[in-house]
Image (cartoon, rainbow, N blue to C red):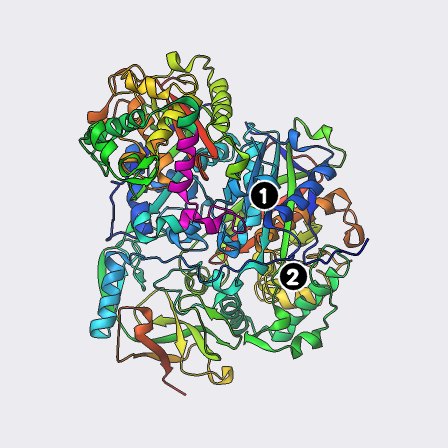
């Protein structure tokens, strides 16, 4: 039987548009040292390291072996994982399974990116098939715009509904000293920002960011060694369906009514494992990988926070604001900081801080259950549920 | 460690170019072979780990190309970027966690589609080292020279590895490069980067492979001949070549020590019957044999010259022909595991070695074997 | 002590590039040669669920069976969703700035169950709608690429 696993230490760099003062290894090291200090342990205590980013954002092959000076993996086991936007949550899940396997008691997970070092759109375009997608695909912004058009067509949602989400994320980011964007954009500001790819405007999108995040995962056998309240992993699941960029629109439109099966199936799996029936009521805070504003409408529906088409009403009700029924992205989320390989892991780190009651000005009161997601690839989805109470039994 | 078994394996043929096949074609072939070998359907696979590398595939999310072909539809799936031995280790952990009964691990590589030196050049630090042209072959030449000078290992001793492994490849129909060679022929092949000659170097290859791992409970239902994972560990040395003693495979020693300890092995030479190791260059087989504890430092050449590592020797090494006879990167480590599984289950065909009960598989990541993963596999639970 | 001048160096990768020669596979090659030689689209049909895939692929993900049956499909279809790209970016396939704005859509060809991405000959989002009929317009010089289709034209403006 596997081990139960908790997050016991968190470290993050300040997320910035560019960090020319550090190399990639040094950026990683900032986060790693912060996490070790937070957990009150040293490099010696780490049994294994998992690391993730997207190779072509920095042009480094074999990032695991390259990272050693920064990651602290010298003469330790280190493994690289990469799945695109979901990389950060993929790394968190890998750290979870490392510990749950019983083979490692203290595992360091690292997600990082220096998006300033390359052309982000170019590198994202090369994520897709060279024959069928790449000649025509225009990167993340346009791919998401296609989703937004479809969503508006199917639900009647408006650009202003989406702007509500974008404004919320930027407002929340003001409470997070680590966030990249600290700009209090109003709905009006967002509506007046230029179109990047209709109907998506500048104010609807995430920035490109340099940053790193490190999280220490520990086994139930050793959690007592650590100073802070353990943030337990209750369940994890993912679905990376589809191989071509136009596939997700097919599946949404034809096979599953018209929604988002990768997210619905992964979320359904973790909800079943933990026994969540009413996510809006039972989950106290959510840190979701919302790469742009419309995601904050549609993904709430797929996560079961409201019915299909109910995203705009949910968001406008204030339920996802600070002080609402389930605050979404108190950190400011992806629309305020997006160092891609770090982004998913930051969601997990933020959930841990919320559960531990250490989230400072962005703290949500009395967090017992927190939800983290990762998004990327062909609308791939990773979902993690975390909690304050140790689960009765291990359940991945 | 709770017992976990390999219950199915599949390898495509390794060829210089499989022009008719994309990544998805290769992976589908390997996965089908592994399912067939296990007598399973894809529905019985609980989760999937794919192995690929964005540089080798020229794609930022290289796993995306095989999401249909790996059979992960509506399953948990993840991607390790590194050698197949590391990907399989992650697959093993996912079973040990209790979350899954079976994991399918697949890897693919098409060396034919890219320019290998440019890609391995990208392993090196861009500010200080990359522009010098360091890549897999030239950096390995530095390591070979450091190792040979320190211990007085000769080029002829390295050539013996090449002669043996290319010869072994005649008994492996999936191998790319069976060659009947003499030491003299290896010695007279042109230098690529002194002391490495053409015939000391692995070829560029296309290929894919897949393994299916299962918990004891599932394995014993599926197959009458499970091959058990007895121990597995990995370890990473320093990054900058200047920070390492290139002649010393200390990370391999550490990984081997921990894998052997899990497997209860105290005397590897006596207790292990066969080795499949990552011989990207001939000298590597000697260095890795030492790191794996089959002989003392600097004695790999003499051990090889004695014939002990031949298929009929005391400790056969790479009876499949090794990476020297077929080197789809990433796939290569998974193939080492698969060869051990075939040998233990007595299904290695013409290359079968008698009486293999315990075998060691080995894979590497990074320049000059910076990171090593060691697997001990056995026929008994 | 005089304050040290702080200069942060950036190293440009310059003309560094990684050339690739990807394989289209058997059915992908058929698709591209049909496009090039006959200005025709072909797909592959799943023997289990009957779904027709364009562009062709080797495996039906949900059924996990190999796809071998080529079927001709229409060069007309409908818009599933669209956008108008107006932000400038460098196309990594050419190394050149992509000319903007351009219309860009997910298109369902008649007789096909999956969709393709392609350009539209319209850049005003108010003149494009989900469900609009479109038809492929081919280039005169064709090389065996998705860009052998210049764009899809809106049929009912």
Residue C65, horizontal then vertical, whole percent: 29, 49
SS for callout 1: helix
Q: Image point 67% across, 64% down: which residue?
A: A314
> In front: A23, or C132?
A23
Q: Quick check: can you spot residue A236?
A: no
Q: Is residue B46 above or below residue B269?
A: below
Q: Could you tell me which chain the residue with mark 2 belongs to?
A: A
Look at the image and give the residue range highlighted in magenta. Answer: B119-146
* Residue B264 appears left or right of B220: right
* The furthest residue to the bottom: C157
Residue B373, horizontal then vertical, whole percent: 45, 31
> In front: A126, or B357?
A126
Q: Which residue is mark 1?
A: A92
Q: Residues within 10 Å of mark 1 (few under 14, many from 20)?
A: many
The image quadrant where one finds the C terminus of chain C is bottom left
Q: Is residue C136 above or below residue C1?
A: below
* Magenta stretch prevailing secondary structure: helix
Q: Could you tell me which chain the residue with mark 1 belongs to?
A: A
Residue B266, horizontal then vertical, whole percent: 46, 13
Q: Quick check: can you spot residue B195?
A: yes
Q: Image point 51% across, 45% down: which residue?
A: A63
Residue B205, horizontal then vertical, whole percent: 29, 44
Q: CA distance from mark 2 to mark 1?
A: 24 Å
Q: Quadrant of residue A178?
A: bottom right
Q: Is residue A62 above or below residue C145?
A: above
Magenta-span inclusion, residue B126: yes
Q: Which residue is mark 2?
A: A17
Magenta-span inclusion, residue A42: no
Q: Residues within 10 Å of mark 2 (few under 14, many from 20)?
A: some
SS for callout 2: loop
């Amino acid at each position: 039987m596997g081990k139960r696993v908790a997050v016991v230490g968190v470290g993050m760099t300040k997320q910035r548009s560019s960090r020319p003062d550090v190399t990639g290894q040094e950026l990683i090291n900032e986060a790693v040292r912060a996490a070790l200090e937070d957990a009150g342990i040293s490099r010696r205590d780490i049994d294994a390291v998992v690391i993730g980013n997207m190779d072509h954002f920095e042009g480094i092959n074999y990032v695991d072996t390259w990272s050693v000076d920064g990651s602290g993996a010298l003469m330790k086991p280190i493994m690289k994982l990469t799945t695109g936007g979901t990389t950060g949550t993929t790394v968190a899940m890998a750290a979870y399974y490392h510990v749950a396997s019983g083979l490692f008691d203290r595992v360091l997970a690292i997600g990082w990116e220096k998006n300033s070092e390359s052309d982000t759109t170019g590198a994202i375009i090369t994520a897709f098939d060279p024959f069928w997608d790449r000649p025509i695909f225009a990167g993340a912004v346009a791919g998401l715009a296609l989703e937004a058009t479809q969503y508006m067509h199917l639900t009647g949602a408006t650009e202003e509904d989406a702007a509500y989400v974008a404004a919320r994320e930027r407002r929340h980011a003001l409470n997070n000293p680590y966030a990249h964007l600290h700009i209090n954009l109003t709905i009006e500001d967002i509506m007046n920002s230029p179109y990047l790819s209709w109907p998506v405007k500048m104010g609807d999108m995430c920035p490109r960011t340099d940053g790193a995040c490190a999280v220490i995962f520990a086994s139930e056998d050793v959690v007592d060694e650590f100073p802070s309240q353990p943030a337990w992993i209750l369940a994890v699941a993912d679905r990376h369906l589809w191989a071509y960029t136009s596939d997700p629109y097919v599946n949404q439109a034809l096979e599953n009514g018209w929604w988002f099966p990768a997210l619905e199936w992964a979320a359904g799996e973790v909800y079943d494992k933990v026994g969540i029936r009413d996510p809006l009521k039972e989950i106290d805070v959510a840190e979701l990988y919302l790469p742009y504003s419309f995601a904050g409408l549609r993904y709430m529906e797929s996560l079961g926070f409201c019915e299909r088409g109910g995203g705009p009403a949910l968001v406008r009700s204030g339920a996802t604001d600070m002080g609402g029924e389930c605050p979404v992205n108190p950190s400011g989320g992806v629309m305020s900081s997006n160092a891609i390989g770090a982004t998913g892991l930051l969601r997990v780190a933020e959930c841990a801080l919320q559960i531990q009651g250490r989230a400072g000005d962005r703290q949500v009161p009395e967090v017992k259950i927190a939800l983290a997601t990762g998004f990327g690839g062909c609308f791939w989805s990773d979902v993690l549920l975390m909690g304050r109470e140790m689960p009765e039994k291990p359940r991945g | 460690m709770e017992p976990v078994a390999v219950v199915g394996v599949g390898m495509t043929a390794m060829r210089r170019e499989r022009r008719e096949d994309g990544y998805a074609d290769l992976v589908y072939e390997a996965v089908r072979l592994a399912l067939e070998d296990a007598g399973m359907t894809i529905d019985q696979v609980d989760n999937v780990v794919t192995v690929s590398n964005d540089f080798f595939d020229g794609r930022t999310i290289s796993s995306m190309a095989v999401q249909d072909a790996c059979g992960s539809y509506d399953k948990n799936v993840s991607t390790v970027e590194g050698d197949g031995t590391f990907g399989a280790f992650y697959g093993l952990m996912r079973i040990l966690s209790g979350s899954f009964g079976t994991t399918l691990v697949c890897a693919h590589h098409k060396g034919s589609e890219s320019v290998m030196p440019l890609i391995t050049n990208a392993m090196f630090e861009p500010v200080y080292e990359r522009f010098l042209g360091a890549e897999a072959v030239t950096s390995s030449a530095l390591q070979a020279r450091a190792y040979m000078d320190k211990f007085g290992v000769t080029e002829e001793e390295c050539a013996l590895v090449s002669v043996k492994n290319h010869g072994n490849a005649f008994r492996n129909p999936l191998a790319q490069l069976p060659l009947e060679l003499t030491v003299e022929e290896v010695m007279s092949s042109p230098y690529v980067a002194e002391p490495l000659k053409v015939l000391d170097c692995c070829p560029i290859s296309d290929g894919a492979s897949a393994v299916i791992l299962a918990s004891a409970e599932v394995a014993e239902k599926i197959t009458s001949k499970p091959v058990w994972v007895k121990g597995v560990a990995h370890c990473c040395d320093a990054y900058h070549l200047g920070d390492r003693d290139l002649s010393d495979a200390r990370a391999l020693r550490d990984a081997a020590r921990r894998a052997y300890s899990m497997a209860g092995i105290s005397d590897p030479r006596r207790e292990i019957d066969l080795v499949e190791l990552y011989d990207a260059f001939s000298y590597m087989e000697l260095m890795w044999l030492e790191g794996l504890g089959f002989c003392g430092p600097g004695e790999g050449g003499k051990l090889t010259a004695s014939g002990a590592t031949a298929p009929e020797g005391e400790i056969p090494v790479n009876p499949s022909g090794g990476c020297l006879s077929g080197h789809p990167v990433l796939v290569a480590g998974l193939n080492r595991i698969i060869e051990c599984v075939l040998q233990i289950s007595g299904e290695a065909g013409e290359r079968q070695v008698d009486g293999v009960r315990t075998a060691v598989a080995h894979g590497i990541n990074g320049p000059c074997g910076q990171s090593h993963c060691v697997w001990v596999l056995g026929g008994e639970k | 002590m005089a304050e040290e001048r702080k200069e942060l160096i950036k190293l440009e990768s310059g003309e560094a590039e990684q050339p690739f020669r990807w394989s289209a596979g058997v059915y992908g090659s058929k698709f591209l040669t049909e496009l090039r030689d006959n200005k025709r689209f072909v797909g592959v049909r799943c023997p289990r669920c009957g779904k027709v895939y364009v562009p062709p692929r080797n495996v039906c993900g949900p059924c996990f069976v190999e796809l071998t049956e080529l079927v001709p499909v229409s060069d007309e279809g409908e818009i599933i969703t669209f956008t108008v790209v107006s932000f400038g970016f460098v196309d990594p396939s050419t190394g050149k700035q992509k000319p903007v704005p351009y219309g860009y859509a997910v298109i369902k060809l008649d007789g096909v169950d999956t969709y393709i991405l392609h350009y539209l000959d319209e850049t005003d989002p108010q003149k494009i709608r989900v469900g609009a009929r479109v038809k492929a317009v081919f280039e005169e010089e064709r090389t065996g690429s998705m860009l052998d289709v210049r764009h899809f034209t809106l049929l009912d403006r």
